[in-house]
């Protein structure tokens, strides 16, 4: 169960990263097909996805390019948030797992109580009659 959870959060980070890379590739390709240079397309994608707000590199006049830019914003932001959520899930689950693991280890260090056998009771009685100090079995 624990390994499934760890793999699930890692899978979430991997899925978000793949979606983020795909969004960047599609966006750069789209702006390049719209007639922008490769450097202008990459720059536009970076300032659009990360919300820098410097404005457009080239004026966006067509409604199709405006809708495309909105989709780049939604796709890039969503995938970035998904990646961050996966990382937070990994960290949180790791902390919870470590807390439970430490609790189990602490609990495991206590010696289990067991019934004394007749021999142990006799040994205790004979020792206590001969010794000045008190001897107790767990």
Image: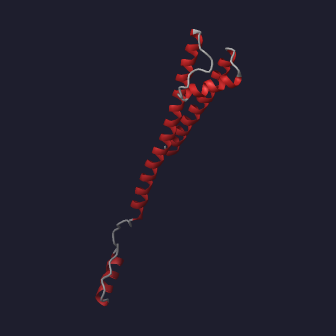
**Which color scheme is applied?**
secondary structure
Q: Where is residue 30, by image quadrant?
A: top right
Q: Seen in the image, is 105 located left or right of residue 44?
A: left
Q: Seen in the image, is 133 located left or right of residue 108?
A: left
- Please state the horizontal and vertical placement of residue 62, each as a whole percent of the image: 59, 9
Task: Judge whether 136 appears above or below 93 on screen.
Answer: below
- Please state the horizontal and vertical placement of residue 17, each as a whole percent of the image: 59, 33
Please count the marks in the image: 0
- Please state the horizontal and vertical placement of residue 135, each as a whole percent of the image: 32, 81
Q: Nearer the viewer, residue 110 or 81?
A: 81
Q: Is residue 61 visible?
A: yes
Task: Judge whether 121 appears above or below 37 on screen.
Answer: below
Q: Nearer the viewer, residue 106 or 134?
A: 106
Task: Judge whether 106 appears above or below 45 on screen.
Answer: below
Task: Judge whether 57 appears above or below 107 on screen.
Answer: above
Q: Where is residue 45, by image quadrant?
A: top right
Q: Nearer the viewer, residue 57 or 107?
A: 57
Residue at 40% over, 56% down? 103
Q: Where is residue 11, by image quadrant?
A: top right
Q: Is residue 23 visible?
A: no
- Please state the horizontal and vertical placement of residue 7, each as a whole percent of the image: 55, 40
Q: Seen in the image, is 50 located left or right of residue 104?
A: right
Residue at 57% over, 18% down? 69
Image quadrant holding the C terminus, namely bottom left
């Amino acid at each position: 169960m624990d390994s499934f959870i760890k793999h699930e959060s890692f899978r979430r980070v991997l899925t978000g990263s793949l979606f983020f890379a795909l969004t960047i590739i599609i966006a750069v390709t789209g702006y390049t097909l719209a007639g922008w240079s490769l450097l202008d397309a990459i720059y536009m994608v970076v300032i659009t996805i990360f919300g820098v707000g410097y404005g457009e590199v080239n004026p966006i006049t067509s409604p199709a390019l405006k809708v495309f830019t909105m989709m780049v914003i939604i796709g890039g932001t969503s995938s970035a948030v998904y990646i961050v959520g996966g990382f937070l899930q990994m960290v949180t689950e790791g902390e919870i797992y470590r807390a439970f693991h430490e609790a189990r280890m602490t609990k495991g260090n206590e010696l289990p109580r067991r019934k004394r056998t007749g021999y142990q009771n006799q040994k205790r009685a004979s020792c206590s009659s001969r010794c000045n100090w008190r001897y107790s079995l767990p």
